[in-house]
Amino acid sequence: MNKKLDTNIITNELEGSAFFPERRSDPVPPVRVVPPVRPVLPVPPSAKRVMKQRHPFDIYQDQYESLQSLALEERKQGGVGSMSAMVREAIDKLLAERRSS
């Protein structure tokens, strides 16, 4: 009961089939030399501010509606119209004003 599998018969039957195409002896084209890439310099820590995500603050309804209106007008003029950016800018102005006085 010790039968050995004859792989030569199987190889001959499968040779040239769609699953085992013939090996080509075409020359392989040479690989292009890739020029070295310049290193990316890190952004200095003072140039980039870390974003604090989703901190809850309460604002009045009329303040929110005014921000929405300003954002919509800015978008109509081709701007970003970011209410978050407007709030950040207002906070920066308030903090600068309070620090200087």
Image: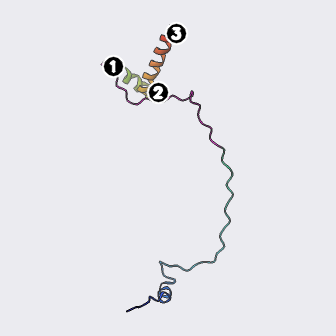
Q: Inspect the image, locate mark 3, and give the three-letter code of the amino acid beneath it.
A: Ser
Q: Are marks 3 and 1 in contact (CB under 8 Å)?
A: no
Q: Which mark is residue 59?
A: 1
- N-terminal-most mark, 3 or 1: 1
Residue at the extreme top: 101
Residue located at (60% from left, 77% from top): 24
Which residue is more in the foreground, 95 or 89? 95
Instruction: Reply above or below: 25 against 82.
Output: below
The residue singled out by tag 2 in the image is 77
The residue singled out by tag 3 in the image is 100
> Which residues are drawn in magenta?
39-61
> Residue 95: percent from the left, percent from the top?
47, 15
Q: Residues within 10 Å of mark 3 (few under 14, many from 20)?
A: few
Badge 1 marks a residue whose secondary structure is: loop
> Residue 30: percent from the left, percent from the top?
68, 65
User: Nearer the viewer's eye, disc 2 or disc 1?
Assistant: 1
Q: Inspect the image, locate mark 1, and give the three-letter code of the amino acid beneath it.
A: Ile
- N-terminal-most mark, 2 or 3: 2
Residue located at (42% from left, 26% from top): 84
Q: Residues within 10 Å of mark 1 (few under 14, many from 20)?
A: few
Classify the position of the N terminus by image quarter.
Answer: bottom left
